[in-house]
Amino acid sequence: MSVGFAVRAGAFVLAVGAIALLPRFISDFRALQLGTVAIFFIALLGLNILTGHAGQISLGHGAFMGIGGYTTAVLTSDFGGLSWEMNDLATVPIAGLVAGVVGFLFGFPALRLAGVYLALATFALAVALPSLARSQKLAGITGGSEGIILPRLPPTGDWLYYVCWSFALPMFVLAWLIVRGRLGRAFRAVRESEIAAVSSGISLPLYKTVAFGISAFYAGVAGALLAIPTTAIFPDTYPVALSIILLTGVVVGGLGSLAGMAIGALFIQFIQTDGPQWLQAVLDRVGVDINETAPGVPSVLYGLLLLAVLLTARSGVAGLLARGVSVLTNRIYHRPIKRQATPSRREA
Amino acid sequence: MALLELDSVTRRFGGVVALDSVSLAIGEGEIAGLIGPNGAGKTTAFNVVTRLYAPDGGRLSFAGRDLLRVKPHRIVGLGIARTFQNVELFRRMTVLDNVLVGAHSRTGFGGEKEARAEALETLSYLDLAHLARRPATGLPFGTLKRVELARALVSRPRLLLLDEPAGGLNHEEVEELKGLIRRIRQDFSVTVFLVEHHMALVMSVSDRVHVLNFGRKIAEGTPAEVRENPAVVEAYLGA
Ligand SMILES: Nc1ncnc2c1ncn2[C@@H]1O[C@H](COP(=O)(O)OP(=O)(O)OP(=O)(O)O)[C@@H](O)[C@H]1O
Ligand SMILES: [Mg+2]
């Protein structure tokens, strides 16, 4: 067992302890917000396996969250002809599986596409879902534009916090096991060179569809959990923007870094909503006066913040932290070494 | 019976006939060379054998099996491993992980420990063990070619396809490579099929040499025979 492993395991245990104790020190409202952070964390973990590891971009993961959310709503409510009226928490894994199967199947057409084309195809999914949910033909299942009311009353912040983190932590461990093993390595091989991956015995159709399936499973679980505090879901509970927000979260947290997804989730929850106000307060201080009520101003401020983050942390915030730590540890553990001449990329 | 057999294989790219009814056979245990001027179709031949490109006509067989019925990702499992002319590594992965991917076809889930041991062993064999934890990106071209060789060898192939292994090597390294190719044949009991522009290298290690020019096979024989062959001399002088 390597030192790196011990350090990571130690950090994980500390994080679990902190997460378990945190609600004692914060308001119920903050706990509610941090419960939602766990939901985004789950969705980002899955998206990162697909995009960060397997190298397949998705602008449609909000739709997989929606499929998860609708699955939970349908299974729990007494709506329509199908009244299963299941316990909502029991439906969460089912919601994950339903979304996972859809994601796996969606992987097949996605096989033929790469880069921008794949982004567009997945985006189409995100665009289609709200319209599908609204359509009259499916209203018997989705409730149309009226949506579906869930049986559970709005939960307390603490309840949501503990429920969501109880899902998030095991799913983090699962993601970690996937990523560090043979499957994750095969995903990264597909990302780095499809030709070499195939020539090494990796089936592109199999691994791409499996990556889509796994990430959609994560999104489905997240979408189901999101339905619970929402207490009712409508076509616009999972809007097109959600898909873009998720991809932003993955990039901000750091493509390929699982722990970084916690940062991405915090970014989604707090910077998206409060960031513009913060930035505005700062701008006020330095004497820049902005009319915050003008339409679009918060979005522009958010855009500026996002740009700032991406420019300072090219490999996501996780990458920035890792670089900072390695600068420190290098200072501590290594005497300055003579720089080797950088080997030229190509001597041919 | 030949280990690898191409029978009238043709492959076109638009108007270009990259392979024009090429037939050749390679016996088990041989080191076979494939030479020809730039654009002669050598890399295309490898790409057809590894099923990255479908031929427009002709037949291919490996150890008596019809390769045209084999999916590309099953080729390595059958025992054909390759390296690439311009290096196709997983650049942002470590050298060890690159080689571990090479073991993918041989080890199932749960075979991780064994795969790791074999990957490290293969890296030591090629004097790369000290680079195991380094990312592939940033290593010199010659080293990258060696990492690719390790990735191919760890799959324990019966047939090893090397596309310009001497690319990017200096004079001494080419000398070393000659010995290495012969040793690999011995130690891994593998058949080697080698594309190379470095004539001294091909002529000294090959048992037989096949010559392509504009997609056609123009000669075949021992290195001595090929060197004397007027068609070969002309192809090279005319190029
Ligand atoms: N994917 C492709 N698309 C279009 N044309 C191709 C493709 N691959 C090869 N060709 C063409 O087929 C012909 C043979 O190319 P190939 O790469 O097999 O030559 P080669 O013998 O390996 O040459 P070199 O020694 O320069 O590597 C060339 O004319 C090349 O332009
Ligand atoms: Mg070539």
Image (cartoon, coloured by chain):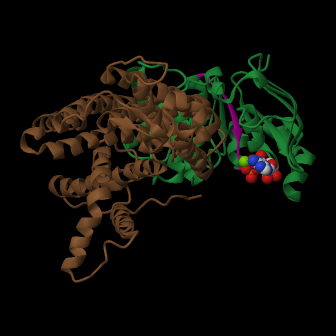
Chain colours: A brown, B green
Q: Is residue B98 magenta?
A: no
Q: Is residue B16 above or below residue B97?
A: below
Point 49% across, 19% down: residue: A81
Residue sitting nearer the eye, B119 or B203: B119
Residue sitting nearer the eye, A348 or A207: A207
Res. A2 image quadrant = top left
Residue A17 lies, in percent from the top left, at 12, 34
List the single residue furthest toward the bottom. Answer: A287
Quarter of the image with the C terminus of chain A in it: bottom right
Q: Is residue A309 above or below residue A149?
A: below
Q: Is residue B193 magenta?
A: yes
Whether residue A207 appears in this view of the structure is: no
Whether residue B142 appears in this view of the structure is: yes
Q: Look at the image and give the residue range highlighted in magenta.
A: B189-197
In the displayed structure image, the side of residue B150 where residue A299 appears, left or right: left
Quarter of the image with the N terminus of chain A in it: top left
Residue A20 lies, in percent from the top left, at 13, 34
Residue sitting nearer the eye, A27 or B19: A27
Residue sitting nearer the eye, B173 or B77: B77
List the single residue furthest toward the left. Answer: A25
Residue B205 lies, in percent from the top left, at 68, 37
In the displayed structure image, the side of residue B177 where residue B191 appears, left or right: right
Numbered-mark total = 0
Point 35% across, 64% down: residue: A302
In the displayed structure image, the side of residue B68 where residue A139 appears, left or right: left
Residue B212 lies, in percent from the top left, at 84, 43
In the displayed structure image, the side of residue A217 where residue A30 appears, left or right: left
